[in-house]
Amino acid sequence: MDDFTRRLKTALLGITDGSLAFLGNFEVEERWALGEHTLPRISAAGGAAVVNHMDEFALLLASGDDHVVLKAAPDPDFLAYLRGLGIDLPTVHVVADSDPRRTVTADALADPALVARLRELAAQGVRLTAHGVSDVEESLARASGMALAAPDSVTCKAVNSKVYSRRAADELGLRQPAGWACETVDELRAAFDGARELVAAGHKVVVKEAFGVSGKGIAVLESDRRMDRLLGLIAKAVDKSGQPRVAFVVEDWVAKRADLNYQFTVGRDGDVRFDFVKELHTEGGVHKGHRMPARLSPAQVAELTDTAHRLGKKLAADGYFGVVGVDAMVDPDDGLYPVVEINARNNMSTYQTRVQDRFVGAGQIALARHYPVRLTGRLAFAEVRALLAGLLLEHAGGTGLLVNNFATVNAGHRAAATFDGRLYGLLVGTSDEQIAAVDDEITSRLEARP
């Protein structure tokens, strides 16, 4: 079988059988955004504890000869469930003191014993790989002596900027919504002048921070007054900081029929391999997961594949190698906007790839999603397995939910307090109707639990 992890190792290491230590430092964009000028924040972002425990996704990306550093020890029954599916799991290393506000990398840096263990693994040739590389991951690499199987953090930050995405697409002549990439206040002022004309013509226009993630760092430019206020606040912040460079993208909010996410890998040697394309699944306008395969024509897939190779060559020339995820859109007439945003790092879809290859057979479809759970105390995987009896996937070619992260269920647990968690999984079936029926039953049982 053409295992994705082997392909990943070929891209990162140049060989298929090397050993990696995985870090699931989700929302690394927040680290890249430090020191950047931002849009005004209405409120502080929440849910850090759950996001940081998404590190457990790395269990299903690593193979049996790899290592994974986690914030918490996985539920033993969850590990038994995965092994029962025939999944070869990596060696797990758990940090000694997990802070819910810290990424797994920051937790690891604060654990001298773990750093020493990583130093031992480094002597055996194990290399470090991360969801995305910032200065924190570089610090852990230096402290442990474990080489990073990735470009340096400066390169990773540069190619993950939305300004880079916009300019790369312009350079390659790829279709994009009308818009502007801005790195000075004067460029932003000129972009807002262009936006005023679009708004006057009835368009919706948005301004995005270069490193905004998960719906954060975006504002709608619905009036001249709004634009004047934002421009004034940003200009004032620039003057006060003495840091004249800004990083924003201003774009027309175009009509679309569907959102897409496709992935390719760029090797150290510049080789580009198209991995997949998935269709985003939304409910009430809210992103809930990914449908695979995407409902696209062969011509549309061919266009995305060609775009991936062109972008990959551009990224390689700029010093990047590794996983690249690209957001794209299908317009109401089935035309493509092949580049909305480049994410040169692991994506949620990346962590689904290995189990998708193994458990989603020919003629089957899958829906990756999560289920919110409201809890008053810790929930064990054995309880969930009993609650969802008959609905969990038990073997390749079967139907049901393959749970691919359980740490996020209890991540928000605090003594004597109600908290919200998320159960992540991959729903597998033979039709959208079958998957919808299983999805509804899972939702019903979770909501009905005492």
Image (cartoon, rainbow, N blue to C red):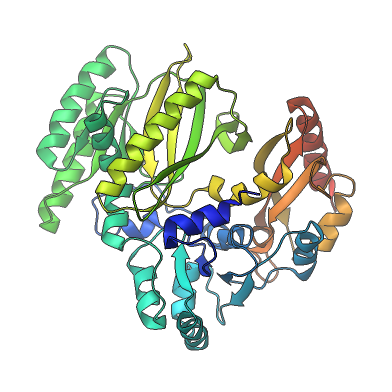
Q: Residue at x 38, y 20 (%)?
A: 254
Q: Nearer the viewer, residue 219 or 336?
A: 336
Residue 365 placement: quadrant = top right
Q: Nearer the viewer, residue 231 or 423?
A: 423
Q: Residue at x 55, y 29 (%)?
A: 285
- In the picture, measured across the screen, residue 70 lies left or right of residue 431, that is left
Residue 45 appears in view: yes
Q: Residue at x 25, y 41 (%)?
A: 163
- In the picture, measured across the screen, residue 123 lies left or right of residue 281, that is left
Q: Residue at x 33, y 60 (%)?
A: 151
Q: Nearer the viewer, residue 9 or 332?
A: 9
Residue 209 appears in view: no
- In the picture, measured across the screen, residue 353 lies left or right of residue 305, that is right
Residue 193 spot, x, y in % from top left: 16, 24
Q: Vertically, is 402 above or below 411?
A: above
Residue 424 spot, x, y in % from top left: 67, 50
Residue 297 spot, x, y in % from top left: 55, 19
Residue 202 spot, x, y in % from top left: 32, 13
